[in-house]
Amino acid sequence: MYGLCASLWAAQQQKMGPSAAPLVAGDYNVKPVPFNEVRVSDDFWTPRLETSRKVTLPYTFWQCEQTPRVRNFERAAGLSEGKHEGIYFDDSDVYKVMEGAAYSLQVYPDTMIRLYLDRLIRLIAAAQWEDGYLYTFYSLPERQPEKRWTNIRQMHEQYCAGHMYEAAAAHYQVTGDKSFLNIATKNADLICSTFAPGKRTDPSGHEEIEIGLCKLYRVTGDRKYLDQAKFLLDQRGRKGNRGPNGDGGLYGVYAQDHIPVTEQTEAVGHSVRAAYLYTGMADVAALTGDMEYVKAIDAIWRDVVGTKLYVTGGIGASGGNEGFSGKYELPNMTAYCETCASIANILWNHRMFLMHGDAKYLDVLERVLYNAVLSGISMGGDRFFYPNPLESTGQHERSPWFGCACCPSNVARFVPSVPGYTYAHKDNDVYVNLFIGGDAVIETANNKVKLAQQTKYPWEGKVTISVEPEKSGTFAVCIRIPGWARNECVPSDLYRFQKAVDEQATLKVNGERVSPDVKDGFARIERQWQKGDTIELDLPMPIRRIVAHENVRADRDRVALQRGPIVFCLEWPDNEGKVLNMVIPDDAELRAEHRPDLLNGVVVIQGTGQVVKRTMDGEIVSSRAKPFTAIPYYAWAHRGKGEMTVWPARKAEAARPEPADTLTYRSKTTASFVHMSLDAIKDQSVPDSSSDSSALQLDFWPHKGTTEWIQFEWSQKQEVSNVKVYWFDDTGRGECKVPASWKVLYRDASGSFKPVQSKTPYRTEKDTFNKVDFAPVKTDAIKIEITLQPKWSTGVQEVVIE
Ligand SMILES: [Zn+2]
């Protein structure tokens, strides 16, 4: 634990930046209390903010220096020579970390960070062209004016610009120094004059600039940036812009460019692009009063929360498009749930709340925050998940960095901004949105109200809020009563608590019980407030079992556990190494225990479940009782790789039974190459089809057109007379196709492999076992040799050797 010392807090109150008075008319009905007005002091968030400042920010800057990201700017600035290295949109990572650093600077004035930012800003200024263009990819090895804007669907020039505007606006707000802002407005002016009616009208392939332009409008008051954001939104999916086939082509649905944004009602395509789009639409709607945008994003929100949201708050189920699948398609092991998409989902839901004043958006926000987002970053602050799956057989671990580093840099900018989601105000009323210990001074229409929270949230439901208005007066303190405390798992029927709990949230003011109406998710306590008043909120925190809508196939006969806002998972280290073979029956008693020694201090859930096993006749039976321990999902993958599940089975059919002791299962198995899981081919779980990736497969991707092998060995000779293979083929989604051919070999007495004498053909049919019979052999090893189709990979779902 540490707290900000009083002098720092005082320094922070003397704002370094410009006046907070808004320059623009309109904007959201409910106003957020910016992060820099909120002081955090609790056991949960303080250490995370500390880690973000001391580890994540310096670490991600270091990575930007080590990888060619900063070097590209140095070269574009003329400090050294060379070509562009890395990915074409790498500039955006530097901007995002700078944005995070600016936020951090506001709360912890740090000369080193300030000076480092100044150095980067000088580099960026020198890399900017005279007319405002800024993008290192087309600036190296020398400037290529003929290439710029030639491929804006793919090249992310406007995406990078958007992140630059966000960083520059943050830097200006914090420091009052216009050096970065001037670079941003010069670039934005160029974009305004290039992309305009009668000139270029084709939309960018990756949304983000719209959010950045709204921020530029807010800090400069120059209306043209808002108009430009609206113009760019309105070009998306517009007839004349939709490519030769009129459908937006490759980037149509993928980049939400298939129909005009005001006609969109469903979340489609790449989920980060999508949620940035919806966030930008909310901003423009708030600033212009355009209700068409609101109608569209309201419908899209219902689609996401009703059919496309993971129980962790993650969005974007599919890795193939890094985005949304169909309704209720929410596979767990292959869940993509990109960390950036979770952050974007928070940005969007926060704006939906500010627009509508309804706490249901904060319910979603809180679910994403404590689960999907926190999973994306290690507790040490320097390891990251890109996808955040809800189930693992041990193939997942956080990485120090990625070639495409959008997620680490997004985490670097997001975590320092978390305090800004805690409070809001409207007219004379103040809102407590999240339960985070610390305090804030909120400037309302006619008063200044200091709120201070004391709480051990998310582990305990007691929150003490002291209310200190500068002058006593009548106003409302609106306290969010989370959906989960009102027996509502999510604001839709996608997930529900298996049992309603009678216990209700209670409120006291100065020790006296009060029962205000809960409207739009807020308990509104309106009275004459004066210094020294105290509110005590007590949220019941029983362990809740969650079941999914029956249309969610992946979660059928499964149960998730939640306590407070925290979603739990079973992970291997606490459960004798295995969790997927377990069943947690509905009547298993559950208890919560606080474990200060575990994973930086967490509450765990314990109980007794059953292990299920497959018999030699293929039957699934419970073999023994086994105690289990569930940990918060965000804390998984800190103790090595292994099994994990957010949705353990509640019925035996949904578990992955311990395999029967078959010849195949007993073998020592090796392969020429392994992508996904080698064990999956002998786990005795038969997929629904060749494209069913939920069953997990061994595949050889990215190998294509090669010859691969899988070998099965035994310590003693076995008589073998047939081999069955179920191929993996995800054509249409991925790059695996049934192979060109295959054959079975056996090891003879001399130790060399010889083909078996087959009696039936080697088939390569989809969606079934392909059985080859051969003259029986006595051998200690069988090898399957597989020749891939040219330009295609392949995979194997299951193998049976008899
Ligand atoms: Zn990302």
Image: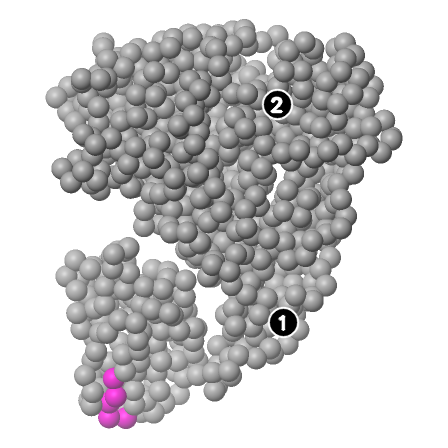
Q: Residues within 10 Å of mark 1 (few under 14, many from 20)?
A: many
Q: Nearer the viewer, residue 781 or 268?
A: 268
Q: Position of residue 537 (x, y in %)?
A: 76, 35
- What's the magenta bit mostly, secondary-structure-wise? strand
Which of disc 1 and disc 2 is earlier in sequence? 2
Q: Nearer the viewer, residue 447 or 523?
A: 523
Q: Is residue 226 left or right of residue 49?
A: left
Which element carries disc 2, helix, strand or loop?
Answer: strand
Q: Are marks 2 and 1 in contact (CB under 8 Å)?
A: no
Q: Quadrant of the C terminus?
A: bottom left
Which residue is identified by label 1? 610
Q: Position of residue 737 (x, y in %)?
A: 23, 64
Which residue is identified by label 2? 424
* Extreme residue toward the right, this view: 511
> Which labelled disc corresponds to residue 775?
none
Which element carries disc 1, helix, strand or loop?
Answer: strand
Label 2 – label 1 distance at C-alpha: 47 Å
The answer to whether residue 751 shows anywhere in this view is no
Colour pattern of the rendering: one colour
Q: What range is drawn magenta here?
A: 772-776
Amino acid at circle 1: Gln
Which image quarter: residue 234?
top left
Q: Position of residue 230 (x, y in %)?
A: 34, 21
Residue at image coords 47%, 58%: 552
The answer to whether residue 277 shows anywhere in this view is yes
Count of number-bearing discs: 2
Q: Position of residue 672 (x, y in %)?
A: 28, 66
Mark 2 or 1, which is nearer the eye?
Answer: 2
Residue at image coords 50%, 28%: 351
Q: Quadrant of the N terminus?
A: top right
Amino acid at circle 2: Ala
Q: Is residue 700 above or below residue 387?
A: below
